[in-house]
Image (tube, rainbow, N blue to C red):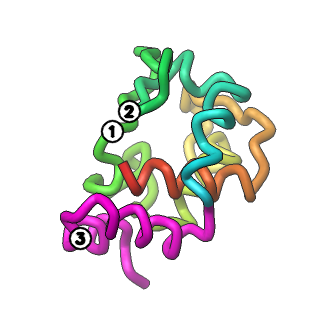
Amino acid sequence: MVTAFATTQYLGNRSLRYQTAILLTGGDPDRSPTIFRRYGCSGCHTIPGVPGADGLLGPALSGLSARVYIAGVLPNTADNLEHWIVSPQQFSPHSAMPETGITSEEAKDLAAYLYAN
């Protein structure tokens, strides 16, 4: 299993990172800004490239591909990121991040965006 960290760190070129993020996640990063706003992610997180996403409750989501862990509890892999986005309380019951109703497909799109940026 290849971690997002190892793959995206090796790929410094933005275009190549973008394509690799799509391959890692099976998602479409271009759909993500709308999804971030629909589910209120931008109210809690600062998200690069998403207008109005300047929340300070949760961590900033820039550089996510360079992190070894997701939320300090899961190794940073595409599958783990998707599962965290869908069901954060399953992995960290005391997390402030709620379960929002984001679908697995939408989570793949969000993961692709976060790994590409």
Please identify, in this view, whether the residue under mark 1 or under mark 3 is nearer the observer: 3
First to last magenta residue range: 1-27
* Left-right relation of 85 to 20: right
Report which residue position mark 3 lands on. 11
Q: Earlier in the sequence, mark 2 or mark 3?
A: 3
Amino acid carrying mark 2 in the image = Pro
Establish if 65 lies above or below 44. below
Establish if 97 lies above or below 16. above
Q: Earlier in the sequence, mark 1 or mark 2?
A: 2
Residue at image point 51% right, 57% down: 112
- Residue 62 has which mark? 1
Establish if 34 lies above or below 74. above
Establish if 55 lies above or below 29. above
Amino acid carrying mark 3 in the image = Leu
Residue at image point 56% right, 67% down: 25
What kind of element bears circle 3? loop
Q: Is residue 76 magenta?
A: no
User: Measured from the top left, where is residue 82 in percent x and y?
Assistant: 61, 57
User: Measured from the top left, where is residue 51 in percent x and y?
Assistant: 48, 21
Give yes or no for contact between labels 1 and 2 (Cβ–Cβ under 8 Å): yes
What kind of element bears circle 1? loop
